[in-house]
Image: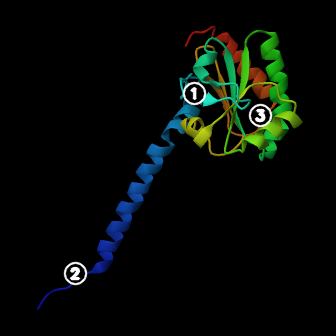
């Protein structure tokens, strides 16, 4: 007579292993952007990911990477034409761009996120945007920052270190404080 093994403990064991696997995957997959956020919150300045990743400029005049702006303060803003908060913060980013250029300190650099070129161009015209924007084809750059919702903004100092992160709509107070921190770096890390 053969003895039947209970099925329930085997099923419970397999499910427990699957849950542990999902937990490990979530920690590993979400680790980079949460590490960036945690580092900035604790006062550290982590290196900006994807510094050398070339992206085509929205205006079609070539391509740029964050490394092209080394020595400058950069306000990296992920946006899309279909994003209401992106439209609401566009005037704040535009004022900031004008100030950064007037002070010869840096630039705002937009990065489109899952947006059609024609829609992005229409957004630029309707909001009278003058700062450059790259098309983040395939969202490769956004993925390096853990960007999944828009808008998201990362302020980099002159050495390409992140000094402030906003995962949501920014305001002038946030940008002014973040740029002040970025300017204090003087190119040092």
Q: Earlier in the sequence, mark 1 or mark 3?
A: 1
Question: Residue, x 58% and y 19% (percent of image)?
Answer: 67
Mark 1 element type: loop
Question: Depth check: 70 or 46 in front?
Answer: 70
- Quick one: label 3, few (<14), some, or many (20+) residues within 10 Å? many
Q: Nearer the viewer, mark 3 or mark 2?
A: 3
Question: Depth check: 49 or 45 in front?
Answer: 49
Quadrant location of residue 92? top right
Quarter of the picture containing the C terminus is top right
Query: What residue did someone put label 3 on?
Result: 170
Verify CB contact (< 8 Å) between mark 3 and mark 2.
Answer: no
Query: What residue did someone put label 2 on?
Result: 5
Mark 2 element type: loop
Query: What residue did someone put label 1 on?
Result: 54
Q: Is residue 98 left or right of residue 11?
A: right
Please determine whether, in this image, residue 128 is positioned above or below residue 100: below
Q: Nearer the viewer, mark 1 or mark 3?
A: 1
Q: Is residue 161 visible?
A: no
């Amino acid at each position: 007579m053969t003895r039947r093994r209970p099925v329930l403990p085997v099923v419970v064991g397999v499910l427990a292993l699957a849950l542990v696997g999902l937990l490990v995957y979530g920690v590993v997959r979400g680790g980079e952007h949460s590490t960036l956020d945690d580092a900035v919150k604790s006062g550290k300045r982590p290196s900006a990911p994807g510094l050398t990743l070339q992206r085509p400029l929205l205006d079609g005049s070539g391509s740029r990477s964050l490394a092209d702006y080394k020595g400058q303060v950069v306000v990296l803003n992920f946006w899309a034409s279909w994003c209401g908060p992106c439209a609401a913060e566009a005037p704040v980013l535009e004022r900031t761009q004008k100030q950064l250029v007037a002070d010869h300190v840096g630039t705002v650099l937009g990065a489109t996120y899952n947006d059609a070129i024609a829609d992005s161009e229409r957004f630029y015209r309707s909001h009278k945007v003058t700062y450059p924007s790259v098309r983040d084809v395939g969202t490769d750059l956004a993925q390096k920052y853990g960007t999944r919702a828009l808008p998201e903004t990362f302020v980099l100092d002159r050495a390409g270190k992140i000094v402030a992160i906003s995962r949501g709509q920014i305001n002038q107070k946030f940008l002014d404080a973040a740029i002040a921190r970025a300017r204090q770096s003087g190119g040092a890390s």
